[in-house]
Amino acid sequence: MIEITRNPAAAERTDFDLIVIGGGVYGLTLTLEAARRGYKPLLLEQHDFNAGTSWNSLRIVHGGLRYLQSMDLRRFFESVSERRWFFRHFPDLVDVLPCLMPLYNRGMKRRATMFAALRLNDTLSLRRNVGVNDDARLPNAKIINAAKTRNLFPGVDRTGLKGAANWFDGVMVHHQRLMMETLRWAIHAGATALNYCRADGATVHGGDVTGVEATDTTTGQNHAFAAPVVINATGPRAANFAATLDAEPTQHPKQLAELFRPSLAFNLLLDHPPLSDHAVAIEPRVATNPQNNGGKPRTYFVLPWTVNGTPRVLAGTFHAPLTPDTNKPKPNDAQVHEFLADLNAASPGLALNHKHVLRIYAGLLPAENPNHEATAHRPLWVDHGQRGGPVGAFSISGVKYTTARLVGEQTLRRIYGSKLRDLQNDTQRPPAEASLDFHTYRTNQGTPGYEDALRRIASLESAVYLDDMLHRRSDWGADPAAEEQARDDLRRILDLPDVPPEAVP
């Protein structure tokens, strides 16, 4: 039995090898990679695990086809390799996602151009299926004709349609469970993880990091945790926390700002039948708002999605710049309207409006330039010890969900160099426990053992609030219409408060 034990007092009495601050996908996978190498890591998250930008992702595990357009082969190969890692280690939680992009012989999206790109994609990713289960093998991509495109995607814009590009990626069908399984794996390998434990700053002695001072936000109690290495992986908070680690942060304001320039990214869960059994990549012929995105039409992925057994649509991603006075992951009504208008223009007859929006998944991503919506291309690292700060303090800011694990490995190599330990022989992912199958229990509520199983899940997975169970241990709360009923069920069964004092998604 694997238990995510929330015991700050016990952790305070433990000497750790490193402390990772931030419980999003970058913090979780970094903690996993450290534990799999025999280190003893402590993960601290001020809210709940997977509660921020990671929770709001589009759930696609991209293989890097988009990078062939700019011939960014390094990012392409990294993406292909990491997509295969997801398929190999989470075959129960990642499915093959067929993708479709209608072609109209405009710009780069011409039949001849896309045919060459797809052939190159298949050639350069020959090892994409090595070590994966048969049902997760990705077929070769192809160009299909207009008639088949209309059959697969009846709502396609048929004016000038020349066919479609058809390729395959991965999709996290149970995203919340995948993150919790990642954490359970890290705990199994020797990690300790504390949610609702806010890191307030590093402790330093003689110029070296000695640990972290933190606050248990459920009690207000202060704690001091010991480790010679502290890694700031707090995503949107990375630049702010990094400033506490530099000896003279005012000497490096530009470098700290570059660590994470926030930009808005959001996806929409829509109360509408799926447009196709494929994820369709669509864009309007002209931008509905020429003042945004450099006047260029945005490309969106529209996925078939299922919420509590009902087929729905998950669409994304809309990117927008943020100014310092709007540094919050929440789109305004005009941005949501533009998103819907783009989808309507790209698929005639769709007729979406604000009433179709079930949930907005919004987060912050690092931007390439200030006040610009284009996301950064590469992860960024800061060794604070090389800038006059404490030795052993590091900051990391990543971009892509798919390559987060690789960035975690690269971070450890930067810290430990040639002394980095190899993966241990017994660090394979442990089997998921049958009692942790939320989907079965939700559809069979009232069956014998149902309530005991939910209590066991809450205990084993460090659920502190009902929101943790509804949104981060399961997807029961995805549909607002069903969320209150599910909350009432849990409120009756579990002795947990509803939401944290500072509400998180």
Image (cartoon, rainbow, N blue to C red):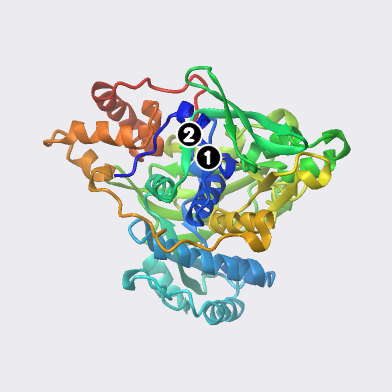
- Pinpoint residue 13: horizontal percent, then vertical percent: 51, 31
Quadrant of residue 377 within the rendered picture = bottom right
- Tell me the CA gap for discs 1 and 2: 6 Å
Question: Residue tagged by mark 2?
Answer: 194
Q: Amino acid at mark 2?
A: Leu
Question: Is 290 situated left or right of 352 in this image?
Answer: right
- Pinpoint residue 77: horizontal percent, then vertical percent: 59, 71
Question: Is 486 situated left or right of 155 in this image?
Answer: left
Question: Eyeballing the image, is 470 above or below 497?
Answer: below
Question: Eyeballing the image, is 188 above or below 95?
Answer: above
Q: Amino acid at mark 1?
A: Leu
Task: Report the disc number at residue 43.
Answer: 1
Extreme-top residue of the structure: 220
Q: Residue at x 61, y 56 (%)?
A: 407
Q: Residue at x 38, y 67 (%)?
A: 152
For mark 1, does the 10 Å Cα neighbourhood hold few (<14), some (14 to 19), or many (20 or more) residues?
Answer: many
CB contact under 8 Å: marks 1 and 2: yes
Question: Is 409 situated left or right of 449 in this image?
Answer: right
Q: Residue at x 65, y 52 (%)?
A: 287
Question: Eyeballing the image, is 248 above or below 499?
Answer: below
- Pinpoint residue 241: horizontal percent, then vertical percent: 69, 34
